[in-house]
Image (spheres, grey):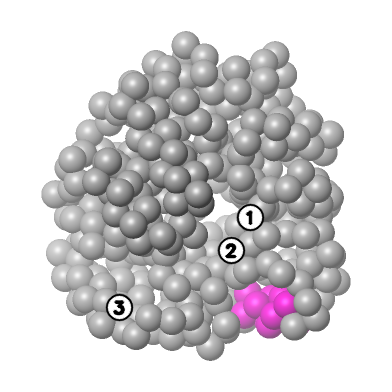
């Protein structure tokens, strides 16, 4: 029965993309809670884009969480900026838990002291994902002196909460750039020592606030030598014994060198933009539903499902389908639903994590 249920879910996403109509709700609703950040990372373009007074209220976010739960969404992702600059983050995680969904927070980890970690554990959070971009020297160069040590300390404090019985998982996101292309394997070993559950290696984008920007000549974009080094690292990762942490490959790491070389084509990767993840941003305290190609609904005037199925959403999905620039973002990647063959393979394996 479980296999059949998952088959129907994956088939629903596959058919939705084929028909350009969402027959199933998105897997994730992602909230951009704030553009405020306590760091000034060299490769980030989000910090400070919008003032604090324009952010969504606690009651507004809670209302949208309840809509997502009624719709059948399984998880809620909170991003920023730095989500822990919002004092209501614990309350929002509790709201997700009460509605029987899984909450995920992406954070730089520098604001997580012992009290914050205890409050977070008590909130029922499902997963805490740290942004770590390499070993200490590299990470501190990108994000500021001492930021690596602060994040590692937060890992330890959260591990203490898990030893007390908290049930959340821990992850680390590593954005692959020229400066850290040779550190992937050592990073996995580091994360193993930190008892991290999962690591994902994500592609660098010239503008992480707008994936449609196309400029591979910017700083941090790997050149030929670093691409060759990246291939070596990916090969070595493939030879490492499986275990903890798991390496999240959505999409496959094998596509990263082609992405940076500019040889990756639309047929090499299937984009589920407009189907897998519903993104919620804000403007002047108004919640907006968007895809990577534009806004498709003012959520002060319509419900989430209505906006997701609107004519504007339909047009934006057409734009995503014809996009000639694969971004390889995991929020748009859904390899298990990319074809009927992939669906059957996933169901036969019986691994639906």
Q: Are circles 1 and 2 on residues that touch, CB within 8 Å?
A: yes
- Alpha carbons under labels 2 and 3: distance apart: 21 Å
Numbered range of the magenta stretch: 150-162
Looking at the rendered structure, the number of numbered marks drawn on it comes to 3
Measured as percent of width and height from the top left, residue 315 is found at: 39, 16
- The residue wearing badge 2 is 129
* Dot 1 crowding, Cα within 10 Å, few <14, some 14–19, many 20+: many
Point out the tag, 2 or 3, that comes first from the N-terminus.
Answer: 2
Above/below status of 319 relative to 236: above
State the residue in front, 285 or 322: 322
**Which one is in front, 49 or 121?**
121
Q: Quadrant of residue 225?
A: bottom left
Residue furthest front as drawn: 1
Any magenta on residue 152? yes
Name the residue carrying label 1. Answer: 104
Element carrying mark 2: strand
Residue denoted by label 3? 237
Q: Main secondary structure of the magenta part?
A: helix
Q: Is residue 223 left or right of residue 37?
A: left
State the CA–CA distance, disc 1 to disc 2: 7 Å
Q: Mark 1 falls on what kind of element?
A: strand
Q: Could one spot residue 244 in this view of the protein?
A: yes
Query: Is residue 207 something one can see in this rendering?
Result: no
First reached walking from the N terminus: tag 3 or tag 1? 1
Q: Where's residue 104, x and y in %?
A: 63, 55
């Amino acid at each position: 029965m479980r296999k059949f249920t998952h088959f129907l879910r994956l088939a629903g996403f596959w058919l939705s993309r084929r028909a350009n109509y969402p027959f199933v709700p998105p897997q994730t609703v992602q909230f951009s809670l704030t553009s405020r950040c306590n760091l000034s990372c060299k490769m980030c373009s989000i910090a400070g884009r919008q003032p604090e007074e324009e952010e969504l209220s606690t009651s507004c976010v809670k209302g949208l969480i309840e809509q997502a739960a009624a719709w059948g969404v399984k998880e809620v992702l909170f991003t920023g900026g730095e989500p822990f600059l919002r004092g209501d983050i614990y309350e929002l995680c509790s709201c997700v838990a009460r509605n029987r969904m899984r909450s995920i927070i992406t954070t730089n980890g520098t604001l997580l002291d012992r009290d914050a970690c205890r409050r977070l554990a008590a909130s029922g959070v499902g997963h805490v994902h740290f942004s770590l971009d390499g070993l200490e020297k590299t990470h501190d160069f990108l994000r500021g002196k001492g930021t690596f040590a602060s994040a590692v300390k937060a890992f330890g404090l959260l591990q203490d909460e898990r030893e007390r019985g908290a049930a959340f998982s821990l992850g680390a996101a590593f954005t692959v750039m020229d400066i850290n292309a040779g550190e992937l394997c050592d990073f996995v070993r580091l994360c193993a020592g930190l008892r991290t559950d999962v690591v994902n290696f994500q592609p660098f984008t010239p503008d992480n606030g707008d994936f449609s920007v196309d400029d591979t000549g910017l700083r941090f974009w790997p050149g030929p030598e670093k691409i060759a080094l990246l291939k070596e690292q990916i090969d070595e990762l493939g030879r490492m014994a499986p275990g903890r942490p798991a390496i999240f490959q959505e999409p496959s790491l094998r596509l990263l060198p082609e992405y940076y070389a500019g040889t990756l084509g639309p047929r090499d990767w299937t984009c589920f933009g407009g189907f897998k993840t519903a993104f919620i941003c804000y403007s002047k305290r108004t919640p907006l539903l968007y895809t990577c190609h534009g806004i498709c609904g003012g959520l002060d005037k319509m419900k989430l499902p209505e906006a997701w199925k609107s004519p504007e959403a339909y047009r934006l999905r057409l734009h995503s389908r014809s996009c000639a620039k694969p971004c390889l973002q995991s929020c748009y990647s859904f390899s298990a639903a990319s074809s009927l063959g992939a669906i059957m393979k996933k169901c036969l394996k019986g691994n639906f994590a």
